[in-house]
Image: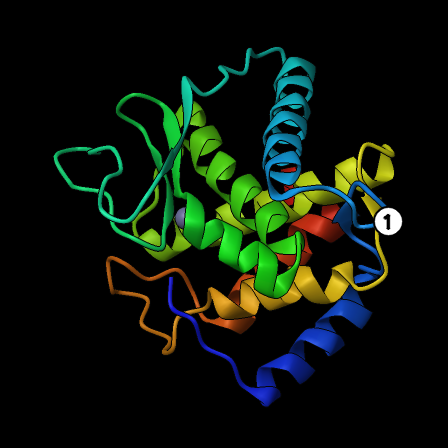
């Protein structure tokens, strides 16, 4: 992920927020007393329970990930013959696991708040869902934006059901996280493309507003 921050994007975020009715997303503890580990565990557990129910409603069975692997720097698991890279989180279809650079994730959590965890983890689970649904995309960016949409749909469902409670300021955290994860340029053909900050926020908002079936 590329870290890009500009004031202009922040303004876009606020506008998007107003238009999607995302007033108070995603954190469990109003006092902000959750630890980083609590948030990681909560994000994983609630996201999987959401998808388990969702698959169930469709007459399908969700297959929980096989492993949730913290790593450090370059010491992460290999996926498809490719080594893990620092400052990243990813889903690996071979082995059906999610891995994340723990200290990178924790620094996002420290710098941006718990919203970072509640965007990144549901996004990676979105890829696990794509793999189970055998969703095929022509371009990588389409898969990435759908995973953002899935993350938005997951979080709104969890907030609506009361499984997650929002703290004041969470909205900014969530949107900042997406802003920080945007590509610096709009290069859809790049096999590593994830979408610009605006595209990612918009995909997230689509899911948040209309639920995962809209993704
Ligand atoms: Zn992704």
Is 29 located above or below residue 145 in the figure?
Answer: above
Q: Secondary structure at mark 1?
A: loop
Asked whether, in this view, residue 36 is left or right of residue 78, the answer is: right
Q: Could you tell me which residue is drawn at 63 percent across and 18 percent down?
A: 52
Q: Position of residue 179 (x, y in %)?
A: 55, 70
Q: Position of residue 9 (x, y in %)?
A: 59, 82
Q: Give the residue number, with chain letter if any, for mark 1.
A: 31
Report the quarter where the C terminus lies: top right
**Residue 134 appears in the rendering:** no
Which is nearer the eye, 187 or 86? 86
Asked whether, in this view, residue 42 is left or right of residue 142, the answer is: right
Which is nearer the eye, 181 or 133? 181
Report the quarter where the N terminus lies: bottom left
Q: How is the image coloured?
A: rainbow
The total of numbered circles placed on residues is 1
Is 138 located above or below residue 126 in the figure?
Answer: below
Name of the residue lying farthest toward the bottom: 8
């Amino acid at each position: 992920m590329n870290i890009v921050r500009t004031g202009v994007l922040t303004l876009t975020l606020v506008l998007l927020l107003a238009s999607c009715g995302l007033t108070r997303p995603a954190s469990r503890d109003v006092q902000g007393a959750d630890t980083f580990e609590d948030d990681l565990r909560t994000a994983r557990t609630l996201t999987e329970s959401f998808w388990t129910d969702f698959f169930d409603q469709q007459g399908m069975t969700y297959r929980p990930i096989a492993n949730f692997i913290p790593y450090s720097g370059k010491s992460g698991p290999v996926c498809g013959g490719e080594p893990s890279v620092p400052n990243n989180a990813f889903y690996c279809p071979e082995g059906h696991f999610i891995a994340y650079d723990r200290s990178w994730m924790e620094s996002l959590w420290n710098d941006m708040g718990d919203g970072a965890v509640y965007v990144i983890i549901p996004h990676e689970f979105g890829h696990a869902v794509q793999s189970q649904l055998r969703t095929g995309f022509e371009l990588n960016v389409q898969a990435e934006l759908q995973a953002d949409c899935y993350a938005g749909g997951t979080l709104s469902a969890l907030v609506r059901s009361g499984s997650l409670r929002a703290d004041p300021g969470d909205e900014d955290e969530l949107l900042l996280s997406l802003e920080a994860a945007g590509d610096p340029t709009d290069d859809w053909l790049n096999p590593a493309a994830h979408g610009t900050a605006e595209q990612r926020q918009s995909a997230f908002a689509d899911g948040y507003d209309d639920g995962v079936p809209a993704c």
